[in-house]
């Protein structure tokens, strides 16, 4: 079996007047993430990890913020398109491991729903998607609640014909 590993990272600023979307679900919070699309840092980090595993660049190459077509885009729709590109190269997801870094809101109540939503979008089993959440212990921009970031690692396996 051939495997490839990719890692991804994304960060967006928290601002009033935007919904907080993480892992494809809206989380109640007084602030949301600022970005050209829905600014879902978790899904963006996963997409970058998938693309990186096959040396296919990053999401900015496929969905540039300068293109109005992607304004307000649902990141789950973008994730589906990235996975189609991966599948066209004859690879499939082995597993995803990710971490969201945020001081607030507390994300534990939403982790399972996020994982289920991502797994459903990708058409993979729920146990292939791991999401963890942590704080930055009030250090730096994330710790001061100026933004939220996410890290992801994706293992791709060569698809068996």
Image (tube, rainbow, N blue to C red):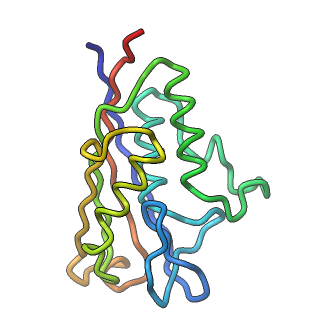
Task: Using residue 92 as the reference point, say whether residue 40 is left or right of it.
Answer: right
Number of numbered discs overlaid on the protein picture:
0
Residue in view at x 42 percent, y 9 percent: 161
Whole-percent x, y for residue 57 in the image: 53, 35
Residue occupying the far top of the picture: 161
Task: Using residue 66 as the reference point, say whether residue 74 is left or right of it.
Answer: left
In the rendered image, the vertical position of residue 69 relative to residue 25, given as above or below = above
Residue occupying the far right of the picture: 68
Occupied quadrant, residue 84: top right
- Of 24 and 138, which appears nearest the observer? 24
Whole-percent x, y for residue 92 in the image: 40, 27
Occupied quadrant, residue 103: bottom left
Occupied quadrant, residue 27: bottom left
Whole-percent x, y for residue 49 in the image: 40, 41
Task: Using residue 11 as the reference point, say whether residue 135 is left or right of it.
Answer: left
- Of 107 and 57, which appears nearest the observer? 107
Residue in view at x 26 percent, y 80 percent: 139
- Quadrant of the rendering where the N terminus is positioned: top left
In the rendered image, the vertical position of residue 124 relative to residue 69, given as above or below = above
Residue in view at x 50 percent, y 28 percent: 86
In the rendered image, the vertical position of residue 29 relative to residue 60, given as above or below = below
- Of 49 and 27, which appears nearest the observer? 27
């Amino acid at each position: 079996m051939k495997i490839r590993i990719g890692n991804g990272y994304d960060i967006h600023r928290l601002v009033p007047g935007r919904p907080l979307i993480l892992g494809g679900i809206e989380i109640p919070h007084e602030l949301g993430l600022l970005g050209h699309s829905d600014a879902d840092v978790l899904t963006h980090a996963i997409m970058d990890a998938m693309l990186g595993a096959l040396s296919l660049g990053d999401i900015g190459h496929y969905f540039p913020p300068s293109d109005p077509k992607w304004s307000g885009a649902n990141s789950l729709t973008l994730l589906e398109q990235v996975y189609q590109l991966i599948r066209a190269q004859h690879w499939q997801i082995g597993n995803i491991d990710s971490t969201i870094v945020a001081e607030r809101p507390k994300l534990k109540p939403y982790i399972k729903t996020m994982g289920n939503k991502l797994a459903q979008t990708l058409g993979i089993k729920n146990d292939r998607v791991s999401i963890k959440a942590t704080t930055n212990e009030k250090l730096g921009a994330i710790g001061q609640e100026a933004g939220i970031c996410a890290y992801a690692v994706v293992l791709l396996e060569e698809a068996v014909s």
